[in-house]
Amino acid sequence: MASSGFGDLFLVLLQMICVIIVVAYLNTRTASFTQVLDGIFTWKGQARLIPLSGARSIYGTESGITILGATANVRDLGPMVGGLA
């Protein structure tokens, strides 16, 4: 996906960030996430959270845009949000 102006590029990256934030917000509303915050670590809870964090990371990497031959993406945002748990 290629855009021309700086404003267009910024808007596309902002949209990508918003998708990750919405998914992270929905993730915080799950029982698995609240258990982790309470210090209760179960295999079942972690098995639910790991794919969600991985999916956010994959989305951030794959949804990049090309700017003058370089790729701008939000790939670091997914693992940072996942690491908060």
Image (cartoon, grey):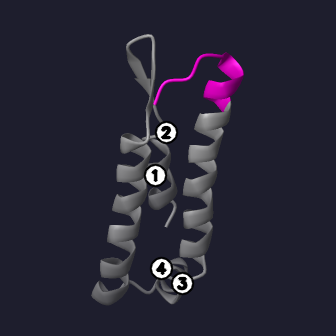
The residue identified by callout 1 is 78
Give the residue drawn at x 40%, y 68%: 52
Which of the marked residues, 1 or 4, is nearer the chain's N terminus? 4
Q: Are marks 1 and 2 in contact (CB under 8 Å)?
A: yes
The residue identified by callout 3 is 30
Disc 1 to disc 2, how far (Cα)? 8 Å
**Which secondary structure, mark 1?**
helix
Note whether 66 is above or below 14 in the view shown.
above
Give the residue drawn at x 61%, y 26%: 9
Give the residue drawn at x 50%, y 86%: 35
Which of the marked residues, 4 or 2, is nearer the chain's N terminus? 4
Disc 1 to disc 3, how far (Cα)? 17 Å
Disc 4 to disc 2, how far (Cα)? 25 Å
* Residue 36 badge: 4
Left or right of residue 43, residue 69 in this image:
right
The residue identified by callout 2 is 74
Residue type at mark 1? Gly
Disc 4 to disc 3, how far (Cα)? 10 Å
